[in-house]
Image: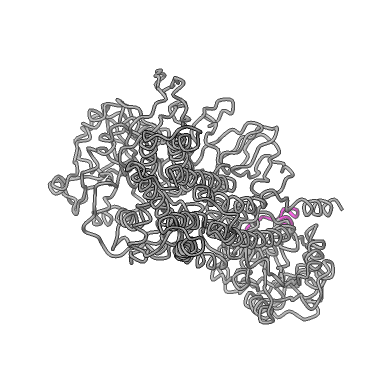
Amino acid sequence: MVAADRSYSSKGCCGDHAKKKGRHVVNRHNLQSRSGRTPIPNHRSGTAISPGLIISTTSPSAPDLESETSASSRPPADSISTSDCSGSSSSYGHTPCGCSEFHIRPSSDACSSETTMTDNVLWKEPEVHDKISIDDLERGPGKVEHVILTIGGLKCACCESGVSKAFRHLPAITNPQVNVVLARVEFDLDVGRLTVSEAINQLHRVTGYTFEKYVPPEAQVLELLVGDPTDICNAGQPYGVTKVEVQAKRSWYPTLAFSGYTSPVPPDVSKFNYTLERSEMKTEKLSGKSIHQYTVEVHYDAKQIGARDVFEYYEQLAPHQQLYLTPLDAHGSLGVSSKQAKTACIVFLVSLVLTIPVLVLAWAPVDEKLVYAHISLAFGTAVQVIATKEFFPGALKSLLHTGVFEMDFLIAFSTTTAYVFSVVLYVFKVLRKPLETGSFFETSTLLATLIFLGRVVSEFARLRAAKSVSFRSLQVEDALLVVSGDVSKTRKIDARLLQYGDTIKVPPHTRIVTDGNVVNGGSEVDESMITGETIPVAKGLGHSVYAGTTNGSGQLIIRLTALPHENSVSQIAAMVENAELSKPKIQALADRIAGWFVPIIAAIGVVVFLIWTFVDKYHYHRSWRSSVIAAITYSIATLIVSCPCAIGLAVPMVVLIAGGVSARFGIIFRDPQKLEVAQNATDIVFDKTGTLTTGNLEVVNYEYGRLWSNEVRDMVLGLIKDDKHPVPTAVFKFLKQASNNEGIPFHPTPMEDIDNIPGSGVKGRPRKGTLMVSVGNPTWLGIKHQILQSQHTLLCVTVSGNHCATFRLQDKPRPAAEKVVKALGNRGVNVHMISGDSEGAVGHTAFLLGIHESRSRACLKPGDKQKYIQDVQAKGGVVIFCGDGTNDSVAIKQADVGVSINDGSDVAKSASDVILMSARLHNMLILLDISKAAYRRILTNFGWSATYNIVAVLMAAGAFVKIRIEPAYAALGEMVSVCPVIFIAFQLKWQNFGKKYREMEYEAECN
């Protein structure tokens, strides 16, 4: 790597100092001669930016420049304009900073054609880091970085304890979370004490596993493949690019370019040749064979520069070579699991090929010859070398560094013992003193091969489970970009090259690429993969659509509102993946059992060896040699047949599947511990407005006092115009409509000193005036008690303490609310309703829904709601609270399980344990059903794991004299024990939790 080994730094602004530190001060007149290329068009302004011209007002290492150039003078991407450098006009002015260099800034006066372009330009050098070879020896103050690593080589569930204990050797690491199913670990790292690369190296040294840093998709990073990164590293950064990093050289499959952009080529493209259409309209051919490329990671701010602009900029910097996007790998954890599964498959096949000749020579009815023993030794040794490489390094490192006996240790010990025993028998045979046991190589080779087979089945089963619940697969890889606003002209590009302001075309019966608003066309969209609702939703002009959903028979033209890394699919996937790293409390029991499992089995193996040695010697009166040989076979079978993997996977596999299944129904568990808690729920507390009711309030009556006037109306409008609560929103809509109907100008008065009191109301003063205007519920405003008995929701207005208006609003219960309340009651769950609304409105809604008056409360502030839940919990209740507004965030946090509805506020979501992507109340019933089903399967897995290990160990140890498990076939133990655990977890996917509830909801809507 040419440029990656260079170090750029500067502490001053002067040209001489810059040269000493490796920075370049160049003459603007020579810019085109350096690049030799035409300028790059700016996608927003339509102007051109030369690849050699780097626009930067300040240097990160020169803070003194900031005082000289105001933030407003920095050149935004859409205000940059320059002509071809060979010409003579430019729309840039220059402002000196006290040194010999000048900073480019926008200027209203363009230079004349006679202007000689000889001014110096300050270049902003890229931050290029070689992740492989550079070690930062001068670390600054402690800084905590959240690190995600994928784990390669994690074969067994009980290995998790070894990985977890390894973190104790690294004080710089805190809050580690390991998931054995996803083969992933997250932790907080003090990079002031330990760099990420050093942490990875030390973890590998201690555990023997391979670790690789995973950058989440939400990062704004464009990964480019280039044969020689010199041009990119030597060039400056365009405005909006924050950092450039060069990775080590790797083998990649090439990518196809569509109209100058790229998309991945499948691995089997070696059978074909592809024609690439370049933007210069020239044709090239590219073979599908793998090529060695450097990976250049370009970090950028998507709000300042688009991904296509970044790609085009660096593409023109390297005209002599092809620039690609990296192929779309599977999500980090899935990619590692897939590689592990493939590696396990290859190891098994090689071992199988080597084992078959040994089995044929041992079992075939042929005369035993010494040459057959030589052949068996050769093949048996080859299999043992493979087994040693697979099991010994990790087992020994874990034992020496963490003191953990992993299952690999038992396997390594057993296979080695079987092999050594086979060699001993071989030696006796060569010496013409064969033992009565005969050949034993078939046992050692078959033992290792069947262990590898079990690993293959286990790896593919775990991979299948992870893929089945992954939301990443819903993300579309390519998009049809509308060109120049003409919907009839589109070009296919990689979705990673989308940028803000793009308009994309969604053909019929295809997935929507990313979130956006419909600007043309109409269709019905299947949103079941996001919300769990199977009925298509009609979409037309102005409607929002979401990534991953499926378009119907119509065509949609949408303007994107979110890039792929931040759309609905990415957000849901991130929440589900983060939840999978947390552990339910019952997992602690499984971890303790798995931690003691291997030492206990090792002790049992020793006891079995001793018992059978003495039984054969003194009970069956055999020789010591024969007794030891027989005892060894029983001991090996005991060590191999046991398997803690079933215990280790009992909980995480069910949590993984349950989290994915619930997400498919529009229920996102942010904390899997609540999956265990929810099944014990005794009380469910609902908020009223927007939860049990639709939240679509209408003003049905109003009363104006003598103080009401158009000025008061405008002040009220100015006070509540930004309020998102359903009640003031409905009143704002009503007053606005009334103004339009009466032909009165709509001019909300600017207000100041606004004080929004959650659960009560809002007050403030006009900017030009002293009146205090208050809008809120009558209790807070001290209105007369008789008003509170109204069955309507009330919003009152006072001016300087004088009551001047009352608005009466009406809301309707959600269609299936009554049936859901009844269904919960039939399950023995107590249903409560609490609200900040008036007593009359709350009592009326409780009566309609069948909620007992003793379990409904009105006029509650946020603190009162929290106190109510505390009172229920004090009586021994396990409480689920479901709400949707900011006023509910305290109650959501207080409940044992806090549930928020998707259209609720961000504050409520941040406090909630579960998010409902749909406001349909039957999701609460599905939540309880999934929780109970998941817990039952966890207990079933524990029961199966215990039963298998007890029975299998007894049979292998010879407890049943006439029924025993031979050492070779004991190797099937992992497959036999793990597969049922995965099958039991998978049953959650095959159960249709929502069918009967959806029918109930639709029936209620029809009525």
**Residue 595 in view:** no
Question: In terms of depth relative to the viewer, which is nearer, 32 or 964?
Answer: 964
Depicted 935 relative to depicted 448: above or below: below
The residue depicted at 40 percent of the width and 29 percent of the height is 254
User: Is residue 981 a member of the stretch shown in magenta?
Assistant: no
* Part of the protein shown in magenta: 737-748
Residue 582 location, x and y as percent?
Answer: 52, 62
**Residue 65 in view:** yes
* 367 with respect to 231 (left or right): right
Question: In terms of depth relative to the viewer, which is nearer, 705 or 405?
Answer: 405
Query: Could you tell me which quadrant the N terminus lies in?
Result: top left
The single residue placed furthest to the front in the displayed view is: 621
The residue depicted at 28 percent of the width and 65 percent of the height is 141
Residue 163 location, x and y as percent?
Answer: 41, 59
Residue 380 location, x and y as percent?
Answer: 39, 41
Q: Quadrant of residue 940?
A: bottom right
Q: Quadrant of residue 703?
A: bottom right
